[in-house]
Image (cartoon, rainbow, N blue to C red):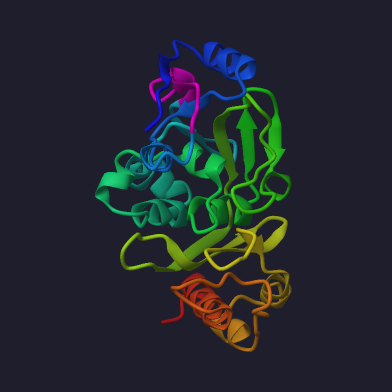
Amino acid sequence: MYAFQYRKAKSLNEAGDILGRDEEARPLSGGMTLIPTLKQRLAQPTQLVDIAGLAELAGVENKNGVLTIGAATRHADVAASRVVQQAIPALACLAAGIGDPQVRNRGTLGGSVANNDPAADYPSAVLALNAKVITNRREIAADDYFQGMFTTALEPGELIVRIAFPLPKAAAYCKFPHPASGYAMAGVFIADTVQGVRVAVTGAGASGVFRWAEAEKALAKGISAAVIEKLTLAADDCNEDIHGTREYRAQLVKVMATRAAAALSGEK
């Protein structure tokens, strides 16, 4: 690990000011990706700005048809929140299946969305639910936020403050987790929203989370597992590594989408 200066921010404005003035500084919340990266000497920030305890980044609220969750809310707290469980049960279920207990009790919603790991769970929920990523500077629509593997619309010094999830009519998430890491080999979040059905896929895309337009069009006529079973996801744009081929991941997406659709339609 390289040497760095540790700064514990007293406010969101202070954190934003430090990060805005120092391009090599990095925010620290749960640290589930950043700390291992530092240990492996793959990153050399000048400063770590601790934002985990900021009151501006806390809180869970369901108001006027929107579920708003503070960026520093840990996965375990999202999973255990009665507000989340009642408003969007699929989101609570997703959070409960992230990583292992250690990760769930340290990792945060904002950190996961800011990092945009191609196999992370939360990006699929943000994209499928057509959420808004609210930062210390602006609001970013989900369709504009995710811009490729580990790439987002966030600018230097910009911090996620909270994420606003419009309440769907219904939603379901199913994933095939890697047995060691718990990351999604393929995960599919289907949301029946007031704008229509949205299907977001994580873990399988070569460039990260993406919407499966063909599935959305098919499910718009009626949500059922049979609808998904008739589809085939092109493997060309899927991720391939030592854990699975493109064709394998494409098939996993179809299976997970079938299960999610079955859960939405009440099929067994």
Is residue 257 depicted above or below 62 in this figure? Answer: below
User: Magenta residues, as a range?
Assistant: 44-57
Q: Quadrant of the C terminus?
A: bottom left
Q: Position of residue 28 (x, y in %)?
A: 44, 28
Q: Is residue 264 magenta?
A: no
Residue shown at the point (62%, 45%) measured from the top left: 131
Is residue 264 depicted above or below 162 in this figure? Answer: below
Q: Position of residue 199 (x, y in %)?
A: 63, 65
Residue shown at the point (48%, 25%) measured from the top left: 57
User: In the rendered view, does 55 fall on the left or right side of 103?
Assistant: right
User: In the rendered view, does 100 fall on the left or right side of 195?
Assistant: left
Is residue 173 depicted above or below 219 in this figure? Answer: above
Q: Quadrant of the N terminus?
A: top left
Q: Is residue 46 magenta?
A: yes
Residue shown at the point (41%, 36%) measured from the top left: 38
Q: Position of residue 124 (x, y in %)?
A: 56, 56
Is residue 132 depicted above or below 231 in this figure? Answer: above
Q: Nearer the viewer, residue 254 or 180?
A: 180
Q: Quadrant of residue 135?
A: top right
Q: Nearer the viewer, residue 162 or 113?
A: 113
Residue at the left extreme of this rendering: 101
